Amino acid sequence: LANHYFSALGANHNIPFGEHDCWLLSLPLYHVGGLAVLLRAWLGGGAVAVPPPGMELEAALDRFPVTHVSLVATQLYRLLQRKEGRLALRRLKAILLGGSAIPPGLIEQAHALKLPIYTSYGSTELASQVAATPPGANLEQLQTSGKVLPYREIKIAADGEILLSGETLFQGYIEKGRLMPARDADGWFASGDLGEIDGNGYLRVLGRRDNMFISGGENIQPEEIEACLSRIAGVARVLVVGVPDA
């Protein structure tokens, strides 16, 4: 449990969560994002609101004295479509976004409403968040995945892959009853994600290494195209895939 402890410790350092706060369990407990909520609450002394099965997210935000919530892009999108959802989000202290890439247009919409959003980058293998934006981040910063949190380490390999290490890193995978280490000789875990870190220490995730395809001799990262298309008015969701030439 040590890696989960250090994960919660670093996360609470960035997004304060104390005895007068309440985090809505909006993600399943079998997902590391949901499990991490319990650890952060245990460490910070705050409450966790567990909605009954079938309760809509908007209704749960209204029913419980929620101050914090974790959302994936689809959840945020649906809440922003309704006035009641927008009002519920405005009452919160912190909205942690993650799970996958958040469309730039969605971040712009939330920022324009002055919602207390935090973008992040996480990994099951590192017990949830690895990087996150700080409180009060501006729009440019929110279009990144933030800075590395305490007790984690990030570096970019020569080929652009994001390498991870630190106190939150797991021990390895269980294969056929045996623990198989998943780090290299220097203690780094290859995430499979591609990224870059700017001069201010902000991480920008460019996509999955195994999503890249080749077209006309060029390496194409579909996530970059998706980010551009998602900015077009009227485009709610977009997915780019490679198909064989006719």
Image (spheres, grey):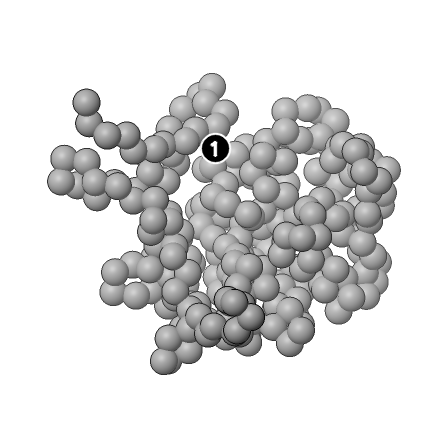
The quarter of the rendered structure image containing the C terminus is: top left
Write down the residue under mark 1: 105
Q: Residue furthest front?
A: 176
In the image, is 181 to the left or to the right of 95?
left
Quarter of the image with the N terminus is bottom right
Q: Can you give x and y, in whole percent of width and height, for residue 191 in the image?
A: 41, 60
**Which residue appears at 44% of the width and 50% of the height?**
144
- Name which residue lies at 42% across and 73% down: 183
Query: Which residue is found at the position 82% from the left and 42% from the top?
Result: 51
Q: Is residue 209 above or below residue 102?
A: below
Task: Report the front residue among 173 and 88.
Answer: 173
Looking at this view, name the residue that lies furthest to the left.
Answer: 217
Q: Amino acid at mark 1?
A: Gly
Residue 179: x and y, percent? 52, 74
Q: 145 or 31, which is in the foreground? A: 31
Q: Nearer the viewer, residue 160 or 119?
A: 160
Q: Residue furthest top?
A: 234
Q: Residue 203, percent across and down?
A: 42, 57
Residue pictured at 58% horizontal, 46% vertical: 97
